[in-house]
Amino acid sequence: MAEREFPKFAPTHEPKQPLMLDIEDFNRRIVGAYNRGVGETELEADLSTAESFIPPATAKLRDFSYIAPEIPLYDPSNCIGCMECVIECPDTAILAKVIHPDTLERELQKVDDPMVREMVRARFGKTRKYWDTYERKEPGSGGLFGIFIDPTKCKGCAECVEQCDDFALSMLTKTEKNVPLFQKAFRVFESLPETPAEYIKEALLTDMMLAERSLLYVGGAGSCAGCGEATAIRMMLAATGFKYGPENIGIVAATGCNTVYTSTYPYNPYKVAWTNSLFENAATVAMGIRARWDQMGWKHKKLWVLGGDGAMNDIGFQALSRMLMSGMDINVLILDTQVYSNTGGQASTSSYTGQNTKMSYHGREIHGKTERRKEIAQICMMHPDVFVAQTTCADFNHFYKAVLAANEYEGPAVINVYTTCQPEHGVADERASQQAKLAKESRAFPIFIYDPRNGETIRERLDLKGNPAVKEDWYVVPKTGEVIDFIAFARTEGRFAKHFDKDGNPSEELLKAQEDRLKNWRLLQELAGLR
Amino acid sequence: MSISGVEVEKKAVPYPGIPTTADGAEAVVWVETHIGQAACAYPITSSSKMGEGFNYYVANGMRNLWGEPLVFIEPESEHSAASVCEGFAVAGGRVTTFTSGQGLVLMKEVLYTIAGKGLPVVFHIGARALTFHSLNVHAGHDDVMAVADTGWGIVFAKNAQEAGDFAAICRRAAESCGRPFLNVQDGFLTTHTVESILQPEPELLKEYVGEPRLRNLFDPEHPLMTGVVQNQDSYMKGKIAQRAIYARMAPALREAMDEWARLTGRRYHFVESYRMEDAEYAIVGMGSMIETAMATADFLRDQGKRVGVVHVTVFRPFPGPEIVEALRNVKAFAVLERMDNPIAQSNPLTAEIKASFADAIAGTPGYPQIDRVPIVYSGSAGLGSRDVRPGDIIATYEHMWNGRERRYFCLNVKHPLALEPPFDPDIRPAGSFSMRGHSVGGFGSVTTNKVIASFLGMLGFYVQAYPKYGSEKKGLPTTYYLTVANEPIRTHCEMHHVEFVPINDVNAFHHGNPLKGIQENGMVFIQTSKTRPEEVWAGIPKHAQDVIIKKNVRVFALDTVKIAREVAPTPDLEMRMQGIVLAGIFLRVSPVLQHLEASEEELFERVEDALRKWFGKRGEAVVQANLQAVRRGYEEVFEVPRQVMLASQNEAAD
Amino acid sequence: MPKILDYIEYVKTEDGWISRKVHDDGDFIMDRRDPEAILEDISYIERGQRPPWTLLGLPRIIVNGKVFRERDEI
Ligand SMILES: Cc1ncc(C[n+]2csc(CCOP(=O)(O)OP(=O)(O)O)c2C)c(N)n1
Ligand code: SF4
Ligand code: SF4
Ligand code: SF4
């Protein structure tokens, strides 16, 4: 076996032990072999595989162009530049830029193919947000807004289409002819300069993903099409990166879906430092890192722990609780799929009553999960001086605010985020944010922010803003009079399907689940001083 | 000064060591607080002592040799302690933990990830029996064996000196080969036994281990992904590729041992052969009982028996060829192990040694060429700190030289598989003076014992001191042991021969026999508020009086509690002062003064020096109070005259 | 289930040109809302060219009920 010489990996200081990783070689030789489909057979068991570290963003080189049958088609004339499609895409496959027309023309000069030039030019349009408001203030200052799809990253989930209320996106069948065009256009898009700062309004959180420092998750991960977790991770990184920059972020991930789709050799979608140890110890590994960072004077760097409800509510609960008592500046993002998604969907303590999952199957005798759901966010609140938020990606402003506050908060912070898991919830690929929204509205998953800085009492600290009809039991849609209760939510998801008879009447167990959700909601109302 | 059981090269070396007394736990903490950056530990007997020790220095603002403040974290479990260590090490820090028994097996999952990521940490283990049919807090090796295949180097110390030295050696080796090490010592038997040691000088540690310069795998400015997922395409490649890295472990450890020998004169080997030159029979094993076996081998050699001992210091990487080389010429050897797994091929060390011989005789490259395999016996001994005595070692040799058929046996329990010791000699160094104290839990007897040991150590004697720990709490009778000698003390067994028995527990005569093993012309001290010899004598039960008279034992008495109360500058020091008073009594009754060939005046000058070294920082008043306590113990202790004893006997006879 | 685009439609009505995106065999229709943009598209169509925004994707285009461009036809 050949022992190659490994060039040094720019370390903080020269370590005694060399890092056996050469980024250029990794991207060329190793990722190259995998991309050609010969990684398994051709690559040697050499020293670079011994510890199997992966450099950042290798998943950028992964090509999913031919896995999905459809791809979004963008119609700039309907687009208002709201950025919601960009925010919600789990795979960083749909991106936006704002560009001054002169810059655009100058850049297009560099493109040889007149058709490609035309194609790219036609993607940019004049929106009120980036054109009119600027032009009104100062003629000649407006920017053109354009959306581009990266066919190598798009999994065709149609989440973006579902998210676009302005009918600017449709799903288009891929053909041998149109896919290369998407690829060409995206290459030009990438060569265009970054959106200038004057077009990014800091106050407008939705604009954060215009900045490159927010795009720290490059896609190319092996998650299911439309996965709600991936969106949550991207959004957390966007808010953190926008404020602090990638050079100040590290992630400790607990084993679960998130580690499997983001770290399967040799594809790494992250541009930030990342480590995984085990299923149950992410919070305590983070304590070690934080201790060392603080010892080195790296107090300003942001450390995030990622893990599913299994990792945080269940097997890693004691480690999480311990970390919360450390007072250390560590943030936790709980990806609450209400199930052990990674291992194929077994019940966790976060699963809902009645939920049909593996290990709490809905059978003839027993009808799904019989216990109540454990509310991890509320439990975290009872640890002294811990910032806690519960949120969903559909409520992007709420989500972003929670992340920004968690980062500002000098101490432990926990954000429990509802993450749709298509296969285990029994919902369609494009439903991630719609189901999350419904979960919130139906009290299945109320959102809140608990900020210990806001006062002495729980009611001062706990803010239920963002939930519809906060003072009521259930939310009633004004136009239709429809009551959005837990049953209404359950009706839309396969995991509860067996609880409805052929006429659509809910089972006894589901009524119990509804009672559980109402009790939980009333408890929150009481804690927030609304009852 | 040579040191117990450790080969010391007789030449001038840059760092000969600082003579002192310490137990194995303290020896490790000394090294770690100097060279380390952090410790994350969770309490479990017997390793807690190390975590507490490290924390004590952190709480007092100690900095390491490079001026960095130390970090200590106590998480909520050993799984988390190991995880915090992983995090600290991933971010490029030098870190340690201390654990035992259940704690070590609870860490197991994390041990693999630490090794796999190439984090060169060192964990210190007070080896402890695992909870099986019952819980036991004492020494056993099944915990270490349970994690023996997690990719960590494993080094076994057999005394406090080695435990401390190996802390440094493992660190250097780990950081040079990029893989972690376990530094193992026997729980209580080594962790809590105070011995005379040569403490590594801070300058030595600074030069030898060097500034922490570890690769930072979690530097956001140079982001990296570690701990990834791999499938059929790559997992096995990664695992097999690690062979090349593990190939560096043995050379790294060898280099670390060589360099240590060059700097300190203390020479360690992967396999330590003791009196093996022409040995026909050998005992093989790991940890403290093997030092007892070494002392016993000396005794047997004096009787003309050709016996030797082999200590397997390094269990991982397993030194198969060296072991074969060491044992190839004997007729038979017996492997003693502190665990038992009845359904394995053999207990683990035996199995690996047998496999090494199989490789050797099969001509496997790298192994010595042999044409016969000695008879291999295997014994279980010392489980949960069950005593392993010279008599048990002799029984083992006897079993071998009688060519007994039974290849497996156990020691020191009543069982058909057990070997019966033919006799149990006193193999302490000539002129040893041993004390067994009887006290009550919570009375500070552990401290008393340590105070006396440190004292004697400072006066230039070899000491060994330890309490007998049960798992019981306050208020129950406890005993503590101390031996002082002019030579290293290498036996790690319970003391059956004592010259001096101080009794602090008024009930000692009622719930046991405090005079057990007392030697002819021995001495007893009784803590009492009585001031007249007659009264003191009258307080001793008849059966004990008979022994005292028959063995010509001298009886001393004093109210140390009262003295302590009078001299202690603050009430919290009273308990400790009682110990100091007893130290004075010890100086009076033991042959220390003769050994020192000093006058009383000189003795007290040296005592004062010692006290100043120790308490100097707390101010002159404390030094003087202590000196007064020693003096009063020395001067005021009174003896029950022989006539008083005999008079009462005569009365009784009348 | 995701709505799949069938074609882009331009229709001249009494009130002028309208344009729609027809999905799922006509089950789902998206109106295009920017009259200026539609007129610009028509100017291309009148010149016999694909509206530029459809160059990327090359969807089928139907103008007043007649296929103007097939899918993938430039
Ligand atoms: C000690 C241990 N037990 C079980 C597993 C198997 N396992 C890996 S991930 C996982 C479930 C993860 O569930 P969750 O934390 O909710 O994350 P999700 O996959 O849903 O995102 C399980 C059971 C493991 N890796 N380690
Ligand atoms: S279809 Fe899905 S993956 Fe593709 S761009 Fe839209 S949201 Fe992203
Ligand atoms: S969601 Fe629709 S309107 Fe908003 S930016 Fe995306 S395409 Fe434009
Ligand atoms: S199983 Fe669920 S959580 Fe896992 S990748 Fe798929 S959608 Fe995401």
Image (cartoon, grey):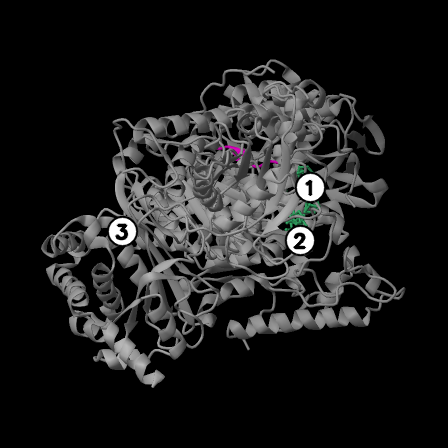
Q: Which residue is mark 2?
A: A337
Relative side of B91 to A398, left or right: left
Between A116 and B637, the one nearer to me in the picture: B637
Q: Find residue B405 and name its label.
A: 1
Q: Residues within 10 Å of mark 1 (few under 14, many from 20)?
A: few
Chain assignment, label 1: B
Give the label, 1 or 2, closer to the camera: 1
Q: Is mark 2 within 8 Å of ligand 1?
A: yes
Residue A84 visible in the shown view: no
Q: Amino acid at mark 3?
A: Gly
Q: Amino acid at mark 1?
A: Glu
Q: Marks 2 and 3, how far apart in space? A: 45 Å
Q: Marks 1 and 3, how far apart in space? A: 60 Å
Residue B55 visible in the shown view: yes
Where are the magenta residues, as a range? Answer: B223-228
Q: Secondary structure at mark 1?
A: loop
